[in-house]
Image (cartoon, rainbow, N blue to C red):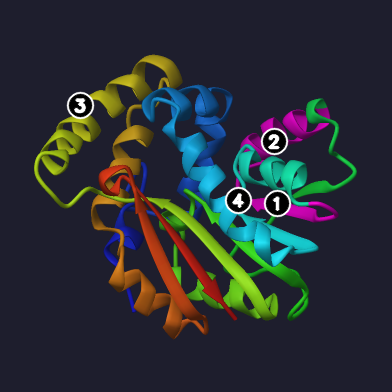
Amino acid sequence: MTYQQEQIKPYSQEGAKGQQVEQMFDSIAPTYDLLNHTLSLGIDRRWRRAALKALQPHAPRRILDVATGTGDFALLFARHIAGCTVEGIDLSEGMLNVARRKIEKAGVADRVTFAKEDCLHLSYADEVFDAVTVAYGIRNFEDLDAGLREMCRVMRRGGTLVILELTTPQRFPMKQLFKVYSRGLMPAAGRLVAHDARAYSYLPATMAVFPQGEKMRDILKKAGFSAVSFRRFTFGLSTLYIATK
């Protein structure tokens, strides 16, 4: 099945989405953390901590963090889940380079590794991870179903899936306020700070059409996951999905 966000590309309708997403994140990597925390008013950190608390009781030993970006999720797990190792993957070497510096500075490089990987074609064997996680990256997948099937494939039976994704508020007045914010402030900030307004127009555009709530729950079940639950944060600006293989 083709989903609407798969048809939205950062720069041009010509060419593969995955290549353009890689180019986009290479471009904005140096300012990504600054803009991410600023545009969310720092609330994104609270959402990540909620995801961590949901994963901690499962005590995973080996975690795969897909679309790891600058490594915030990977770093959080390494600091707060005793005995775990984290393997973070991403399409963008620019983002991974930021992540590597962050992990070295935090002193957890012995427990966290990063590699450039395509989530649609993972190089890992079947059923090797206790948990697979994604924070704010799944809506950039060129093929959502294929990416989820790969994540399910590399996860052990009984393993835990954690997805944290930005979503669009559905109720007044947050729905209307977010529309103004995403169409005006985000591209302007992207142009001013990251010098890439198109990237910060693309990101809210994918949020607007990405399946959320019950629809995403059904998609996860189709990909092979069970016991799927979700929790919305901050008037629907972010949604946490938890599932089991």
What kind of element bears circle 2?
A: helix
Find residue 99 and name its label: 2
Look at the image and give the residue range highlighted in magenta: 82-104
Determine whether 54 is above or below 194 in the image.
below
Q: Which of marks 2 and 4 is in front?
A: 4
Q: Position of residue 163 (x, y in %)?
A: 50, 59
Tag 2–tag 1 contact (CB < 8 Å): yes
Find residue 184 and name its label: 3
Reading the image, the residue beneath label 1 is 88
Please give the name of the residue rendered at 52% of the width and 40% of the height, measured from the top-left corner.
Answer: 23
**Looking at the rendering, which quadrant does residue 66 occupy?**
bottom right
The quadrant in which the C terminus is found is bottom right
Q: What residue type is labelled 1?
A: Gly
Please give the name of the residue rendered at 31% of the width and 63% of the height, measured from the top-left corner.
Answer: 212
Reading the image, the residue beneath label 4 is 52
CA–CA distance between discs 2 and 4?
A: 18 Å
Find residue 35 and name its label: none
Q: Which amino acid does label 4 sit on?
A: Leu
CA–CA distance between discs 1 and 3?
A: 32 Å
Determine whether 200 is above or below 132 in the image.
above
Tag 2–tag 3 contact (CB < 8 Å): no
Q: From this viewpoint, is residue 32 visible?
A: yes
